[in-house]
Every structure is written in structure tokens, then in C-alpha cells.
Amino acid sequence: MAFLTDRKRATGMGSAKSGTMHHWHMMVSSVALCALVPLFVFTYGYALGMSYEDAAAYYTRPFPAIVGILTLLVGFLHFKGGVQTLIEDYVQGFARKALIIGSICLSYAAMAAGVFAIVRIAL
């Protein structure tokens, strides 16, 4: 017969002590995206009707390249945090760990590919 207190039964089943930091990162990235997405739409929407040569010349300017890189980085970091929260809430067991690792790898791979593409055009 085990005489456990409520606190002893709950040990190991509660907070991972990172929820506040995760929430803060999501709030900061969402505020940053509120400013970056309109800049991204206006800078990249401007080049929609251009020929390839004109668009490549436009993207060699630093402002469109910096806006694109920042939007990609902040957007995929926000995506990583949101998907991780979704997986933690709805998936259990080994699948949770595998999906979190997969989503983190996917996010960083997409960030690297996007930054590489913009840098390649810009330089």
C-alpha cells in the first residue's frame, strides 16, 4: 500500500520549465513577422512582372535581400515553435520525439535552402 501525497504523484508529470520562454519566443517572432511580412510582400511583389535579368539585378540590392532573409529566418523559427507545440499537445510516445526532431530538421533545412538561394542571387 503506497501512501503518496498529491505532490509526489505529480512529480515528473508537470512543467518542463520552458513554457514561459517558448511563449515569449513565439510572441517576439509573431511581432517581428507583423513588420517583416508587409515589407516582404512589397519588396518581392514589386518584382513579379520583371524579366529574369531585371529581377536578378533588383535582388542584388541589399534591402530586398535582407528583408527576404529575415522573413525566412523568423518565419521558419516561428513555424518550428508552433509545430513543436502542436506535436507536444496531440502526439504521444516515440512518435512525439521523432516528429519533433523531424520538424526541427525540416525547419532548419528550409531556412538554409532559402538563405542560400537569396545569397546566391544577391551575390
Image (cartoon, grey):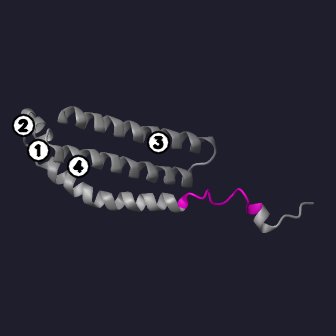
Residue extent of the magenta highlight: 9-19
Which of the 4 image quarters holds residue 17?
bottom right
Mark 2: amino acid? Asp
Which of the 4 image quarters holds residue 19?
bottom right
User: Disc 2 designates what residue?
Assistant: 54
Q: Are marks 2 and 1 in contact (CB under 8 Å)?
A: yes
Q: Which mark is residue 47?
A: 1
Who is closer to the viewer here, 13 or 19?
19
N-terminal of the two: label 2 or label 1?
A: 1
Q: CA distance from mark 3 to mark 4?
A: 23 Å
Residue 112 position, x and y percent, is 35, 36
Q: Which mark is residue 104?
A: 3
Residue 28 position, x and y percent, is 38, 60
Mark 4: amino acid? Val
Mark 1: amino acid? Ala
In this view, the mark in front (4 or 1): 4
